[in-house]
Image: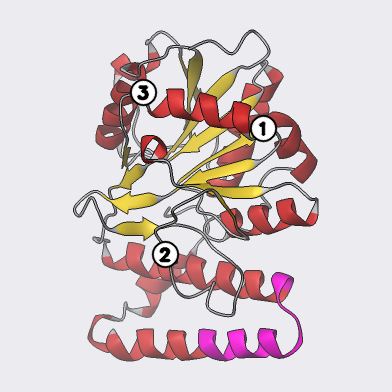
Amino acid sequence: MSLGNNVRLVVVVPVYGNWTDTADCIRALLAQTTSEFRVLIADDGSPTLPPAELTSLDRVQYLVGENLGFAGNCNRAAEAAISDGATHLLFLNNDTEFSSDFVEGWMRALAEYPGAVLSPVIYWVADRDRVWYSGGLMSVWIPFLRQRRKYSRVTRVDVICGCAFLVPAVEWRALGGFDRRYPMYFEDFDLAIRASQLSIPVLVMPDPQLAVWHRVSGSFRESGAWAREYRLTHAQLLFIRVHYQGLRRQICYALAAARLAAIFVLNLPNLPQPRALWRALVPGRAQ
């Protein structure tokens, strides 16, 4: 499939460790039915080096830098790709699966919907017909509940998931990339809302060819789990403050307080010691 020299697609795969999933993802990308794209492995200062095979593959670039968090890492990778000529960016989590004509489908979609931010429907790897996240419209439940609608047609939405989405380089730069105040979590929702505010369409693409299956890990070390919870709550409260007003904001704050109280009650036997909790919350110690 050829769209001419005016389209240069780069698939950006953000990475922090987890080289096993990353290698599987890269192999699946290189086995696609089209080769008219490049892959950029964006390493956010992983504690271990990647396998040598990943840094010496054709059409694969390896970029590593200091640990910036998910948003900063994606911004750094996007700037490198665009500076090197990319016209479109397809962000893709390394713990995902997809069909062999996945990229070919995205090439067709970007031609059909130019100037739009596009997101697939995302499913669970362990239950391949069950929606993990679909994106949707703004409500007071957005910061708390994952939307899992099975769309039957291309639909304009307010928020999408950063697990997989495509954005033209021009629109990415117009948005200024991810807001780095969200180092992890809610940076994707924020980007989509800001896109709509700039009249950039944000669309969910239910085409099965574009479907993504997400391998979601439920296991965390004790300190890692609380570090994750801290970052999630921080980003959640920031998102509420930035994107909600009046009564809706107060309702969201009340729901956030109730959620946090429930987490502490349910995890009382497993609360970390103060010193362990402090280590968990130090920025850059966990991701």
C-alpha separation, residue under disc 1 versus residue under disc 3: 20 Å
Which residue is pictured at 28% across the width and 68% down the height? 222
Residue 228, label in figure: 2
Is residue 254 a member of the stretch shown in magenta? yes
Whether residue 181 is visible: no
Question: Relative to 73, does residue 197 appear above or below in the rendering?
Answer: below
Which residue is pictured at 65% across the width and 75% down the height? 240
For marks 3 and 2, give the one nearer the viewer.
3
Question: Relative to 159, does residue 68 appear above or below in the rendering?
Answer: above
Bin the neighbour count of mark 2 within 10 Å (Cα to Cα): few under 14, some 14-19, many 20 and up: some
Under tag 3, what secondary structure? Answer: helix
Whether residue 95 is visible: yes
Under tag 2, what secondary structure? Answer: helix
Amino acid type, callout 3 = Leu
Dots 3, 2 in contact, CB < 8 A: no
Q: Tell which circle, 2 or 1, labels the residue nearer the N-terminal end.
A: 1
**Quarter of the rendering containing residue 16:** top left
